[in-house]
Amino acid sequence: MHARFLKSMSRVLALGFVAMLPVALGAQAATAGKAASNDSPSKWDIFVGYSYLAPKGSVLTTLPNGSTITANYDAVNVGGLFSGAYFFNKYVGAQFELGEHEYGTNNGSAPHTGTQGDNDGFMTYSGGLIARFPLENITPFVHGTVGAAYVNGPYYQANTWGPALTIGGGLDYSTPFFNHHLGIRLFQADYEYIHEDFGPSTTVFGGRANIDAARLSTGVVWHIGSITPPPPVTLACSVSPASVFPGEPVTVTATAGSLDPKLNAIYTWSGTDVTGAGATATVATSALAAGSYTVKADIKEGKAGKEGLKPGQSASCSSSFTVKAFEPPTISCSASPSTIKPGEGSTVTAVGVSPQNRPLTYSYSATAGSVSGTGTTAVFASAGAPTGVTGITCTVTDDKGQTATANTSVTITAPYVPPTPHAQALCSISFAKDAKRPTRVDNEAKACLDEVALDLQRSADAKAVVVGDSDAKEKAKTEKQEAFAAKHKKSKAKVDHFDAQRAVNTKEYLVSDKGIDASRVTVATGAADSQTVENYLVPAGATFGNDVQGTTPVDEATVKADVRKPLGEKPHHKKAAK
């Protein structure tokens, strides 16, 4: 290869690296550790490569003697190409390009036409736009630039700057071996148009050249930094409440994330009986059967009329809720009073509860008698019902036909039969201590009789029975006295009836000392072998003879009460008439 080519190639590389090194290093530092990939393509692409340039064009020059010479640009030039591209997004960027190409030789010694001098060849500086289309490991691209070309003049005319236009494209391959940082430009094919106006020199007059050039390049690409695409739109759904009964409203809310406030967002809703506007929807559940239901929301973002056309501009979410079956009502039931007499009534109270506050109706039934009422209270009538326990059933029904029952009862008692009264034994009095006055009511006996009097005063319709007893010795004495009187026919002979006397004396104390009506005290004798008096309280309706047997009534006409005298007092006797 010609030495001047190597010189131009090194010049291109040096200029390119000098121009782009600060930018590349800054971008590399900002994105250290980030790998370029198709999902996150590079921010910067730096290309350095080998290039062929095939120009087509001619320059008509006029010599001072008036003759003309035509110089042609038709030889293949070789050189280097350097470019740096900064991408605004995944697809589009701005590009700067620097190229230098020197003419080659036909046979290694004689130069082509137009190679007079040391500064022959083409040098281009341009900038423009580049568009790429990242795929799996390859990236096709197209670009167009506008700039200036520095082209040598023919026949020792001065090198001249002129406008240059480049359009073309190529294909890059990024190798994962270098974590996508280093790639190969498999080819870059461009068309260049160059326009030059050469000024006159001391020997020739200048001419104008319109050059069409085909350029083919290859080399390496350094991918620096990465472009993170906008995060995709996200959408999350929430439902409240998550469980309802038919007729209760359900609200569904869609929460979007990563929305671009500069773009338009459209929400759409789907589901059974779902209506929604924007990020909120409602569900009418009154006609829904028990079960689980799902509501779906979609969002699309983009320019008006173009929402959701680009990747990441749409998202969906769904959320579920449950419609529960109405719960049946519950009921409690009670009757007051719970115990009644035949013919009486009782109030029945029912308390029904619907968990969902449904309308309730009540009904009642009884195993006997009758119940009337349709509200929360009813009346039980016992007419016709037998004595004993009568069952009552309370029923509650909601407007969905669901029922519940509870039971209570009323006890009907038998007619009251008062218990038969009986004689009650009270205290007893002993007469065994006073041998000289064995029938006298002493002070010790008064305590007993005072209690008897109180019992009679408390029970105004009760009576007392005083039963006197004598021991065997006294009974024998009485029998002996009665036998003597009968034998001698002495009706007025003294006979000591110890038991009867004791009973009469006891009554006397109750009547005289305690003020008890004499008609309320009955005296009798018993069969016990003792020197006592037994006192009984006989309530109204009681029959003494049925309760205490073996007693004999005392004839109070023949047995009179003794006058109570202190011991030792002798009776006064009248002197007999002389």
Image: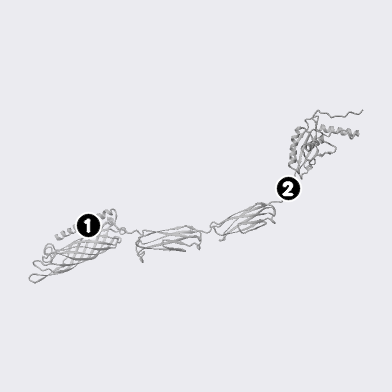
Identity of the residue furthest to the left in this view: 65
The x, y position of residue 109, in whole percent, is 11, 63
Which mark, residue 20?
1
Crowdedness of circle 1 by 10 Å Cα count: few (<14), some, many (20+)? some
Report whether residue 550 is seen. Answer: no
Relative placement, left or right, of 309 versus 114 is: right
What colour-coding does the image apply? one colour
The x, y position of residue 298, in whole percent, is 40, 62
Amino acid carrying mark 2 in the image: Pro
Report whether residue 398 is seen. Answer: yes
Relative placement, left or right, of 236 versus 219 is: right
Crowdedness of circle 2 by 10 Å Cα count: few (<14), some, many (20+)? few
Q: Nearer the viewer, residue 454 or 21?
A: 454
Q: Nearer the viewer, residue 82 or 329?
A: 329
Question: With respect to residue 343, does 268 lie above or below?
Answer: below
Which mark, residue 418?
2
